[in-house]
Amino acid sequence: MELLISSISGVVALVSAIIISISILKKDQGNERMKKIAKAIQDGALAFLLEEYKTMYLWVAVFALIIALSISPYASLFFVIGTVFSTLSGFFGMTVATRSSVRTTQAATKTTGEALFIAFSGGSVMGLIVVGLGVIGSLLSYLITVKFIPQLSPLVAITAYSIGASFVALFARVGGGIYTKAADVGADLVGKVEAGIPEDDPRNPAVIADNVGDNVGDIAGMGADLYESYVGSITAAIILGVFVLGESTSSFVYTIVGFGILSSIIGIISSLIASKMNVAPQKALNFGSIVANILAMVVFFVFSLKYQNGLNYFAAIVSGLIVGLLIGFITQYYTSEKPVKEVAKSASVGGAATTILSGMAVGMESSFLPLLLIAIVIIIAYKFSGLFGIALAGLGMLSTLGVSLSVDAYGPIADNAGGIAEMSNLPHTVREKTDVLDALGNTTAAMGKGFAIGSAALTALALFSSYIQTMKMGSLDIISPYTISGMFIGTSLPFLFSALAIVAVSRTAGNMVEEVRRQFREISGLILGKADPDYKTCVAISTKGALRNMVLPSLIAIVSPFVGFIVLGAMGKDFTGGLLAGALLSGVILAIYMANAGAVWDNAKKYIEQGNYGGKGSEAHRASVVGDTVGDPLKDTAGPSINILIKLMTTISLLFGPYLVKFFK
């Protein structure tokens, strides 16, 4: 009965996504020019995804073969299923999003509430698909193994499935992030700063690539990212629960997940109703989140009463849920309110240098409180339910992911809607309405990243504890030279990974800047609006740059867990333990810093564009654009990819560790 609740909730989520998708497609797309621009964005996004998947699935095939030969062909099968489900979540979510944007633009010709309704509807499709496919895939992997494959542990099956999800997420986040930020940086530096034309101006050759990037990076990439986070939190909770308390905990975990999904669906409906009633956008989105979280806590409490230690489990779950919300509110503060105004003021007083310095300071400062809260929730959860409690806290953070991801995914749709309005030469009032939604989307995206990073810390810690248990180490000896060496190298890996991702954006953006300048220089009448730019060349530059540069950073996560065993033999388990601990600690801090610094630079730019400190075209605006371009690869490429890095390293170590220690001893 309990597993039935989980499976039904997953099916209901998928059916709801289909119903919402159909209702979106029935909405008006506007005039022919709007349809043409939207079609170009849709085609560009689809073309990139297909090329990205071709490259990625070559590596999927190689890794699947390694799993089949070293562990089990069945484990390899579940790994492939994990990659397929993750791919589908990003693909379908992005497909609906690219069709929602133009309809949001048309709705903005009427009211802000109508535009919010369509944009949030598009985002909710992503949220519902991710949680629906996430729980169904994990549950099927577990049940199929129990019923039909007795020679394979169900824990190995769900770990392989989780690695598949992480594998796709890393390629999607890095590849999509390189694409979107290279296009964004190129479009802004030449279009806004040098040519002095508005954002999303149709004269800018990089404008289509920029809008395509919003979808492949901030929709498809983000969907795969949070799909991985969701599946990872379920996997960690089940593995530690079985290790510590026995098989019965798996039913508890899946049922909690199921109730979280149903609560999210009700929260989504609440936000949609609020937007229809023309409630202010921030309040409408917050309303759904509040409804979902309160309902989830009530249901979790009632359900937990059935178990002997249920109230302890409930306390661990709720501690994670509450801390997740607090991290979200802290992120919201640091990426809006007073910090944004201070960074904007720095742009007006000292130019680009002080803009960058003030944004860096905000990012660094913003990492302290979330880390403090994570430390507190670890202690609280452990006190109530031991290591299993830590995993439950991570699960609690993501229990209402359906609604929080819907809020997150709506932002890029609103951003694209503004671009379509600008390129279609619609009245300025339309762009003003979409800009309101877009500015809110930047904050919700930063909050979503905060949630993802916080849950990643707890999930990675739970998976790390599972690694210690699986390797029968008892505990990690931190004064061992092998462990300390691993910690030093592990601490440096997120920095090396981030450097490769940022350099990739920088190189590709450099090529984009040169191309945009060339077109402005060589295409007669382009800057006067008397000639059309060559959009396809800019799209090709972003595509080639992303595909060429996404593999090397991704290989760090895949290869690093094997190095210790290959070099040190049986002692590699201590080295790998230190490697995972070091990567976890530095990765979480670095990810929060980059996400929040990038967001505050972006919002400071938007604050100036609203008419403050001289508005668009002023020296302060030029400085803020430079700050924003520095922050773009931090917040949308390297930063959000780090939480995938630390979890993929841990799950690979967890799956292969017992086999490697025997093989290399």
Image: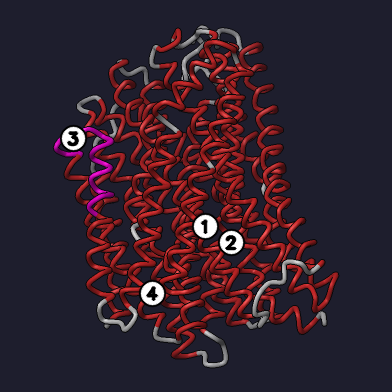
Magenta residue span: 275-291
Residue at 47 percent of width and 15 percent of height: 198
Q: Which residue is mark 1?
A: 456
- The residue shown at (38%, 36%) is 441
Q: Earlier in the sequence, mark 3 or mark 4?
A: 4
> Which of pointers 2 and 1 lies earlier in the amino acid sequence?
1
Query: Which residue is tagged 4?
Result: 253
The C terminus lies in quadrant: bottom right
In the rendered image, the vertical position of residue 567 relative to residue 306, given as above or below:
above
Asked whether the beta carbons under mark 2 and mark 1 sit within 8 Å of each other, the answer is yes
- Left or right: residue 269 versus residue 357 is left
Residue situated in front as seen by the camera: 89 or 321: 321
Principal secondary structure, stretch drawn in magenta:
helix
Whole-percent x, y for residue 203 in the image = 51, 16
Residue mark closest to the camera, 3 vs 1: 1
> Where's residue 471, x and y in %?
67, 80
Label 4 neighbourhood size at 10 Å, few (<14), some (14-19), many (20+)?
Answer: many
Q: Which residue is mark 2?
A: 647
What kind of element bears circle 3? loop
Q: Nearer the N terminus, badge 1 or badge 4?
A: 4
Q: CA distance from mark 3 to mark 1?
A: 33 Å
Q: Disc 1 to disc 4, how far (Cα)?
A: 18 Å
The relative height of residue 126 versus residue 191 in the rendered view (above or below) is below
Mark 2 vs mark 4, CA separation in Å: 19 Å
Q: Which of the two residues, 601 or 217, is positioned nearer the viewer here? A: 601
